[in-house]
Image (cartoon, rainbow, N blue to C red):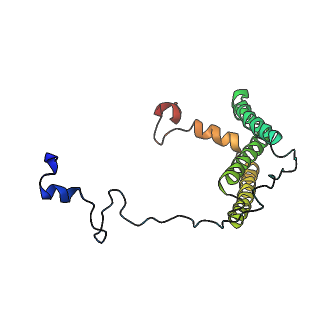
């Protein structure tokens, strides 16, 4: 016989608690709730049916991937060129704004494709698609208004970059004095 199990109180402490007594969970204070209910469990076809092969399309796959990477790489010189050249050209501003809009649209489109499944949530995905289109249009109109009726994107960035603090008489820009 084991000496540590000799007393009856030790035996009771090692036994499982009765099922009708409440058990206190160490980390959870509420019942488990699922965020979304599970979707319909529908099987399309049988186990011996071949997997469907999608139609080839130049807008999907490698061409699309290359265009995304080229757009991302093109934004680097488009962002630096107006400040390096020392001139603020409205055409360069328009190209930069178009590049930002296209880059943002493609990025959010990839997020929707990756995280909102079409088969499980078709109405939600359609809502997100229309929301993305509306947001892209709204940003494009905003950039157009800012470019035509205000100072333009690169001039606004230049003014923010070289702005002084209120009451500061030194000539150092804010971003240099903070660092």
Residue 76, by quadrant, is top right
**Is residue 58 shown left or right of residue 110?**
right
**Residue 9 image-quadrant placement:** bottom left
Q: Is residue 170 visible?
A: no
Coordinates of residue 140 in the picture (x, y in percent): 75, 53
**Residue 113, position in %: x, y?**
71, 53
Residue 13 image offset from top left, x and y in percent: 20, 57
Q: Furthest-left residue in view?
A: 7
Q: Quadrant of residue 133?
A: bottom right
Q: x, y (%) of residue 136?
A: 73, 55
Observer-nearest residue: 133 or 68? 68
Report the residue that reaches farthest toward the top: 84
Q: Is residue 63 left or right of residue 6?
A: right
Residue at (35, 63) in percent of width and height = 29
Between 58 and 31, the one nearer to me in the picture: 31
Does residue 50 show up? yes
């Amino acid at each position: 016989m084991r000496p540590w199990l000799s007393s009856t109180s030790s035996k009771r402490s090692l036994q499982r608690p009765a099922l009708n007594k409440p058990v206190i969970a160490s980390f959870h204070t509420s019942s488990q709730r699922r965020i979304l209910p599970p979707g319909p469990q529908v099987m399309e076809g049988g186990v011996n049916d071949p997997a469907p092969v999608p139609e080839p399309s130049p807008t999907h796959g490698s061409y699309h991937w290359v265009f995304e990477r080229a757009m991302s790489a093109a934004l680097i010189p488009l962002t630096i060129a107006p400040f390096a050249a020392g001139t603020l050209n409205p055409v360069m501003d328009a190209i930069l704004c178009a590049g930002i809009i296209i880059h943002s649209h493609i990025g959010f489109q990839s997020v929707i494709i990756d995280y909102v499944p079409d088969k499980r949530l078709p109405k939600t995905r359609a809502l997100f698609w229309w929301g993305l289109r509306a947001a892209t249009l709204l940003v494009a109109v905003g950039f157009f208004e800012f470019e035509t009726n205000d100072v333009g994107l690169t001039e606004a960035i230049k003014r923010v970059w070289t702005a002084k603090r209120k009451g500061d008489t030194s000539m150092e820009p804010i971003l240099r004095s903070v660092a």
